[in-house]
Image (cartoon, helix red, strand yellow):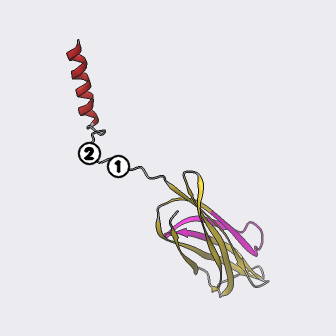
């Protein structure tokens, strides 16, 4: 009976791949980072409206907002995403605008500001301000930010 128990224990260690072996390096588990990106794209001229905008993180669209009324002076954008440490790009794209309630494809001044909040193990680990940038944008143009996630 004792031999059977030893053989079963040795067999289960072999199946487990001896992961707890002191000679085998252990793979460190790093806590996942989650980021929240929030900000507002706002027209700076009275008759111009931001009708549609998108938020990108490292080239991937993470939020999309459309004006739900006839005309919006501003659009709030919010996204949650998993992230890694290092350098990243945050972009805001003006997709559609209007001038005095009519579709408009020219350039108008828009401003964007916001915050990237980095969470590590559920707690705030870093806050990165996206300082106000005002640019002349046409449909499809973007406002860019380079950020460093290093909590």
Camera-side residue of 137 and 29: 29
Q: What secondary structure is found at the residue carrying circle 1?
A: loop
State the predominant SS element of the stretch in magenta: strand
Separation of residues labelled 1 and 2 (CA atoms): 9 Å
The residue labelled by disc 2 is 24
Residue 2 is drawn in which quadrant? top left
Side (left or right) of 26 relative to 68:
left
Q: Which quadrant of the figure contains the N terminus?
A: top left
Residue 70: image x %, image y %?
78, 71
Q: Residue at x 57, y 79 (%)?
A: 142
Residue 101: image x %, image y %?
77, 79
Label 1 Cα neighbours within 10 Å, binned few <14 / some 14-19 / many ≥20: few
Residue 61: image x %, image y %?
54, 66
The residue labelled by disc 1 is 27
- Judged from this view, the residue extending furthest toward the front is 22
Total marks drawn? 2
Q: What secondary structure is found at the residue carrying circle 2?
A: loop
Q: Residue at x 76, y 76 (%)?
A: 73
Give the residues drawn in magenta, as a range: 54-78
Label 2 Cα neighbours within 10 Å, binned few <14 / some 14-19 / many ≥20: few
Side (left or right) of 114 relative to 25:
right
Q: Residue at x 58, y 51 (%)?
A: 122
- Judged from this view, the residue extending furthest toward the top is 1
Magenta residue check for 70: yes
């Amino acid at each position: 009976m004792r031999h059977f128990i030893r053989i079963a224990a040795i067999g289960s260690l072999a199946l487990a791949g001896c992961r707890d072996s002191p000679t085998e390096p252990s793979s460190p588990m790093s806590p996942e980072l989650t980021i929240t990106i929030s900000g507002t794209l706002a027209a700076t001229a009275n008759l111009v409206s931001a009708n549609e905008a998108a938020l990108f993180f490292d080239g991937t669209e993470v939020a999309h907002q459309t004006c739900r009324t006839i005309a919006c002076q501003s659009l709030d954008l919010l996204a949650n995403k998993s992230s890694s440490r290092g350098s990243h790009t945050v972009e805001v794209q003006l997709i559609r605008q209007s001038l005095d309630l009519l579709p408009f494809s020219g350039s108008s001044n828009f401003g964007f500001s916001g915050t990237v909040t980095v969470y590590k193990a559920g707690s705030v680990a870093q806050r990165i301000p996206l300082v106000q940038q005002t640019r002349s944008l046409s449909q499809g143009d973007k406002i860019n930010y380079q950020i460093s996630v290093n909590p």
